[in-house]
Amino acid sequence: MFSQLKKIVSSIQLSDVHAWLGRFIIWSAAAATGLVIVLFAKATEKAISFFEGIQSEIWWVPILMMPVVGIFIIWVTRTWFKGASGSGIPQTMAALNHDEHQPISHLISIKIAIAKFFLVTLGLAAGFSAGREGPSVQVGASIMHSFRRFLPASFTIDPKHLILAGGAAGISAAFNTPLAGIIFAIEELSRKFEQKTNGVMITAIVLAGLVSISIQGNYTYFGHLNVGIINKDILLPVLICGLVCGVTGGIFSKVLIEFSDNLPGKVTTFRTNHPYYWTGFCALLVAGLGIVSHGAANGSGYSLTKAMLHGSIDETWYYPVVKYLATIFTYLSGIPGGIFAPALSIGAGIGYDLASIFHYDGMVIAMTALCMAGFLAGVTQAPITSFIIVMEMIDGHEMVISLMAVSLIATATSRVYSRPLYAVLSTKFAKGVQT
């Protein structure tokens, strides 16, 4: 009897040790994700500053540099890292939708995460209009999923929960928006919320966020805004911003999907048969847009967006137009890069212009923030993520209702023009089609 009891106690103790070891490994994965995303953010910031320095000194250098770098990135991606193309969100969604026993290393892996890190940074250093936030989702998912091999055999966890947690932690650490990370995982990545996912995902977001805060401080992405008094006068601007951003965001999404569908025609034939020439052509267009806009079309758009939100810049009317086109051509070039930050920047520019057109002089900052959420919602058709991410980025809790309303209007309007962007692209990656 005593020996049997001793065996039971030993078995319980061993199981408890394995459980804590498993938790420690997951916590380590989350912390590693936060660290890598912070390093990714700093690397991309340095890359953008590098390009701005070159462009300010010699305006014509991007015409030579962007096609060469773009073609090199495409060659590297197509040769060794096909899963690193695009934003990374569709690949993560495709990995979540794969059957349990199907390989997903072509969608998420440490190899792809490393490639994504360096290729996105290189693309921004060359002046392409892209962001790091979508790629951070794929990087985070890859890191968290890769740690599963270190888990004890007795510690059971669905690998998809690690992917979901990593993707959520990636977006959370990239923007320093923990609530948006949770909502993004529910609304966009998985479109459902399982009780078993709860603890893993929130733990990953918290630990990744703590690492980010310990390095960069407890900051708000765009700082606290003075949006003025929000009352019933905001109703008409909300409707205007929602409709305009829904139309423009829906068309933006439609263009990306249609080109991904490889529609018949001379352009598609040329793109398919001569991918490097196509990349060089797109790069030249982005370079040209950057030159005519004095660099406004290049990079993530963060600095100009922040300046608009703080009222420290007289934004030219054509900024959202050139940024819109530069982001489309960057995506169509095929280089790795996200559209979250450029979409927010385009939305800011649209809001700034609408305030001027309709003479809402006292609501410039508020309409800028509204269109950031509206355009992102129009592109992604993820209204809850869009309004929460902007609310957290600007510390704008007083605008929560208006941000929610504009996101819902923009999403409903966008659906008239386009299918959900990431959902459509994820099915292509699931089928092994490179977009």
Image: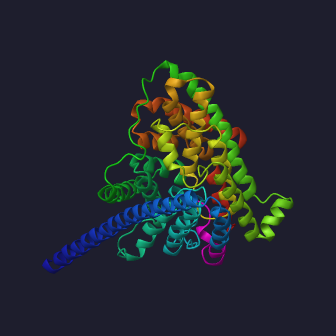
Q: Is residue 82 magenta?
A: yes
- Residue 379 appears anywhere in the view: yes
- Residue 430 appears anywhere in the view: no
Q: Which residue is situated farthest in the left direction here?
A: 2
The image position of residue 45, as x and y in percent, is 46, 59
Camera-nearest residue between 338 and 69: 69
Q: Would residue 172 be found to the left or right of residue 133 on screen?
A: left
Looking at the picture, does residue 278 appear above or below residue 129?
below
Q: Is residue 224 magenta?
A: no
Q: Which residue is situated farthest in the top direction here?
A: 232
Which residue: 41% across, 64% down? Answer: 39
Which residue: 67% across, 40% down? Answer: 248
- Quadrant of the image containing the C terminus: bottom right
- Quadrant of the image containing the N terminus: bottom left
Q: Which region is colored magenta?
A: 75-88
Camera-nearest residue between 178 and 399: 399
Quadrant in the picture for residue 344: top right
Q: Would residue 31 be found to the left or right of residue 353 on screen?
A: left
The image position of residue 172, as x and y in percent, is 42, 53
The secondary structure making up most of the magenta span is helix
The image position of residue 49, as x and y in percent, is 49, 59
The image position of residue 289, as x and y in percent, is 67, 52
Looking at the picture, does residue 311 appear above or below residue 92?
above
Q: Would residue 273 be found to the left or right of residue 360 on screen?
A: right
